[in-house]
Amino acid sequence: MHIIFNILTLLISIVIAFILFTVFCSMAVNTNKEYYKDSKLYRFLLNTWSGIIVHLSRIKVVSSGLENIPSDCNFLLVGNHRSNFDPIITLYILRKYPITFVSKEENFHLPLFGPIIRKCCFMPIDRKNPKNSMKTIDRAAELLKSSNLSVGIYPEGTRNKTKELLLPFHNGVFKIAQKAKVPIVVVTLKNTEKVSKNFPFHSTKVLFDVSDVISSEFVTASRTAEIGERVEKRLRKSLEIL
């Protein structure tokens, strides 16, 4: 009994120490600065907390098609968007690939999480200002060309809270891949909107599928509308099959 108590005490101490360490690291980030180099420390914190959230939320991920992801170059990651858990699950499943996301401004003001994603080169986007949005697209393309980071973005622009499979696409996001001349990895996530409803009494089976990899040759030779049409078809097909 004494041994069990000591083990529990040690585990609780480790958890508290890790939380305090995360708080300290978060407070050390300059929230007025844009970062262009991925931090190994903050990437470790991001991946670790993503894994913790996935497990605590009782999410059981079934993945497929991961072997199709390019391992010799950066890529633009796109997919459907149904839940706030989408990027968290994606970061957890693809933790061997350093990915930075284009995200809404509000996420950068979240306690702890906001400074960490900023340090991992996440980029806020101004959805209401096309000029500012183009600056974010240019920055994302530059990161793809000059760093070890791949970039994730949701073509729907926001979470899909409707009964439709997909919202209309903002095809301008594909300019990121065109400017950087990189392939596009299309991922389908299914059932993520059920996580909040099921927690804490039930687990949620989430399906994660790499549905398509669009070559850089096709990306640079096509119009953004053509790319969007191909991505949408693949996502719809995967959502219907999964």
Image (spheres, grey):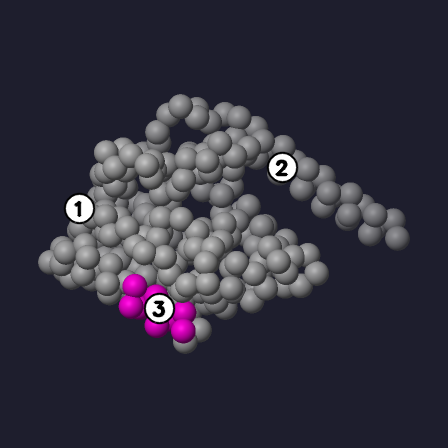
Q: Is residue 229 left or right of residue 11?
A: left
| Label 2 neighbour load within 10 Å: few <14, some 14-19, many 20+ | some
Which is nearer the eye, 235 or 21? Answer: 235
Which label sits on residue 179? Answer: 1
Q: Residue furthest bottom?
A: 241
Q: Secondary structure at mark 1?
A: helix
Q: Residue 38 has which mark?
A: none
Dominant SS type (magenta): helix
Region in magenta: 232-240
Image coordinates for residue 88, horizontal then vertical, percent: 49, 51
* Residue 160 % position (x, y): 43, 55
In the depicted view, which residue is nearer to us: 25 or 217? 217
As measured in the structure, the alpha-carbon distance from the residue carrying label 1 to the one carrying label 2 is 39 Å
Query: Which residue occupies the extreme left position in the image?
Result: 221
**Mark 2 residue element:** helix
**Residue 148, position as x, y percentages in the image:** 30, 45
> Is 61 left or right of 219, judged from the image as shown?
right
Q: Residues within 10 Å of mark 1 (few under 14, many from 20)?
A: some
Check disc 3: other Cα within 10 Å, few if <14, some if 14-19, many if 20+.
Answer: some
Specify which label sits upstream in the sequence, 3 or 2. 2
Which of the numbered marks, if any, corresponds to residue 19?
2
The earlier-in-sequence mark between 1 and 2 is 2
Would you say residue 234 sits in the magenta stretch? Answer: yes
**Disc nearer the start of the sequence (3/1):** 1
